[in-house]
Image (cartoon, rainbow, N blue to C red):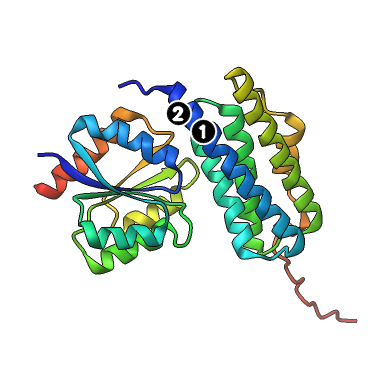
Amino acid sequence: MKLDLAKYRTLFLEEGSEHLAELSRALLELEKDAGSPEAIDAAFRMAHSIKGMAASLGYESIAEVAHRFEDRMARYRAAGRVDSAGVGVLFQGLDGLERMLGCVRETGEAPAAEARLTAALAASDAAAVPEVQPEKKVLRS
Amino acid sequence: MSRRVLVADDAAFMRQMIREIIEPEGFEVVGEATDGLEVVETYQKLHPDLVMLDIVMPKCSGIDALKRILAADRSACIVMCSALGQESLVQEALQAGARGFIVKPFKPDAVVATLRKVVEKRDA
């Protein structure tokens, strides 16, 4: 069976824009409270949802950026917090996704993913890794 | 006779797509839920033949919603909707009692085949 993809493109642009607005609210909250579990969870879910919609329409580049964003949020969720540098990268990701949806709105096509953006989202940072206390060693003289 | 289905996904896009895929194939979407708590409540009201339940949901995760529905009705027939990279969550859902799973992005024929297989197995 064939789905009417033009109809779903319109739905994607409407719902995707709402998701990006909620993502923006979550990131603003994380700027104030880097450990807000609600904001971390909301950002994770919005990225996950955008990924699913984009993949359903064959917008692989948008799905890839959203996937990197989602993965990053999953790491922050495990760590329980985001650091200030991390929030900056997330805002870059949000800006990138907004640009990509804007391109779909104007041309009907998704642009290529920006390599610099996907690399920044994929890069690990200190906040994404739970702190591990070094083992205490007894030195013998 | 059409099978009554409850669809739970926080994205209207996905709920619409599922409806469009399954309704011409003998399934009737009798209810929709947009979060994990709503699907548990709606299940209690509608007692559908099948639930299509997204793993990532607000308020209560799909896995927790699955467990709550099954705690109240062991015979509930639930198919999880997942994305690539969620294999461990799918395993957890199957161990908790989900009857099957489908992976996003949806392939219409695969979605219908999975639902039919799950229903046939339950009816056997």
Label 2 secondary element: helix
For the point 20% across and 57% down, the residue is B47
Q: Mark on residue A8?
A: 2
Q: Outermost residue toward the top?
A: A107
Q: Amino acid at mark 2?
A: Tyr
Percent x, y of residue B46: 22, 56
- Along the horizontal axis of the image, is A111 left or right of B31? right
Label 1 secondary element: helix
Q: Nearer the viewer, residue B71 or A8?
A: A8
The answer to whether residue B30 is above or below residue A139 is above
The answer to whether residue A84 is above or below residue A12 is below
For the point 49% across and 35% down, the residue is A53
Percent x, y of residue A102: 65, 28
Q: Nearer the viewer, residue B57 or B88?
A: B57
Q: Quadrant of the C terminus of chain A?
A: bottom right
Q: Mark on residue A12?
A: 1
Q: Amino acid at mark 1?
A: Phe
- Along the horizontal axis of the image, is A118 left or right of B51? right
Disc 2 crowd rating (10 Å Cα; few below 14, some 14-19, many 20+) is: some
For the point 63% across and 58% down, the residue is A40
- Along the horizontal axis of the image, is A33 left or right of B18? right
Specify the subunit that label 1 lies on.
A
Percent x, y of residue A55: 50, 31
Q: Are marks 1 and 2 in contact (CB under 8 Å)?
A: yes
Query: Same subunit under labels 1 and 2?
Result: yes
